[in-house]
Amino acid sequence: MSDLSRRKLIWTGLAAAAGVTGLGVAARIAQKYGLVPPDHGGIYGLGETLTYASQRLLTRHSLAREFSRSQISKRPVPNEMPPLNEAFKHLQAGGFADWRLSVDGMVARPGTFSLAQLKSYPSRSQITQLACEEGWSYIAEWTGVALSHILELVGIQPQARYVVYFSIDPDWWESIDMADALHPQTFIAYGLNGDELPVGNGGPLRLRLPRQLGYKSVKFITHMTVTDSLKGFGKGLGSAAPEAGYAWYAGI
Ligand SMILES: Nc1nc2c(c(=O)[nH]1)N[C@H]1C(S)=C(S)[C@@H](COP(=O)(O)O)O[C@H]1N2
Ligand SMILES: [Mo]
């Protein structure tokens, strides 16, 4: 069966099961095809499963909308942020020369990258919208290296299913599945609107993921790990967001 007709069949099954026999059956079909998000438990779990499963089946390879330079918002709104910690301030005082991104887990060649190294890899740009769950948004041009490029360098193992990424601020960590990790618009970003990425917007290094809400684009990233299970991280719900009542999968 072609990929498309297989997807159609699963989707038809999901929709029919959700409509006719009740949501529980739809959730079981999603489970059978590995389309259950890590935060599937609890009151909203069924809804999360249906959202994630249907998005994955229908829009797996689709691109977030890109805009023209003339549509770039006048002032990108930096999200309100608490004061940054001492570790951050120390690195900032040194002009971020000692900032490192380490990548480990289910990879053939774990690595640690400086900003200069990351900037030496093929750079990409995208003019996309950053949308916050609170309702505001802005359009900006992001520059960085594709996460897929880094994953290729470290060599992900075939069992890998998720990439978990961490901020220097321990309150912020998220994860994405391989479809989003390898997606061409998923960047490790170091530039904004032609300049260095300002600290207010996550400089010197943040994840940029235009296919999901702003909170998945974690600022100040220092560490990533590739895994086949999210159970061992935090409360096992996949990221900080569901621990605070938001969805792990925040597709837009
Ligand atoms: N480390 C860290 N990352 C973060 C946040 C934060 O407070 N700390 N806020 C998130 C939220 S809720 C949004 S909407 C975006 C905002 O990005 P911006 O400040 O560039 O607009 O960053 C996300 N990444
Ligand atoms: Mo947000």
Image (cartoon, grey):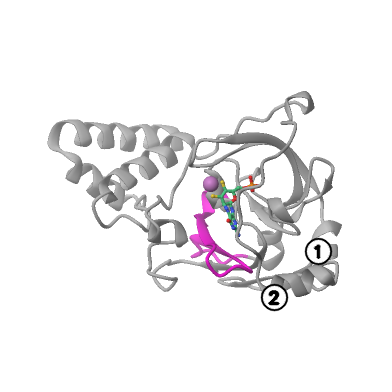
Q: Is residue 223 left or right of residue 112?
A: left
Image quadrant in which you'd find residue 155:
bottom right
Q: Residue at x 75, y 31 (%)?
A: 74
- Residue 88 position (above or below residue 207): below
Q: Which residue is mark 2?
A: 87
Q: Name the image quarter holding the N terminus.
A: top left
> Could you say which is closer to the camera, residue 143 or residue 75?
75
Q: Is residue 34 left or right of residue 92?
A: left
Q: Few, some or many C-alpha atoms within 10 Å of disc 1 (few <14, some 14-19, many ≥20)?
A: some
* Residue behind label 2 places its C-beta within 8 angstroms of ligand 1: no
Q: Is residue 48 left or right of residue 59?
A: left
- Specify whether residue 42 is painted magenta: no
Q: The disc labelled 2 sits on which kind of residue?
A: Ala
Q: Residue at x 86, y 58 (%)?
A: 120
> Could you say which is closer to the camera, residue 199 or residue 175?
199
Q: The disc labelled 1 sits on which kind of residue?
A: Leu
Residue at the outermost left position: 21
Say whether marks 1 and 2 touch (CB < 8 Å). Answer: no
Q: Which residue is mark 1?
A: 115
Give residue 12's position: percent from left, percent from top.
Answer: 29, 31
- Residue 18 position (above or below residue 144): above
Q: Is residue 2 visible?
A: no
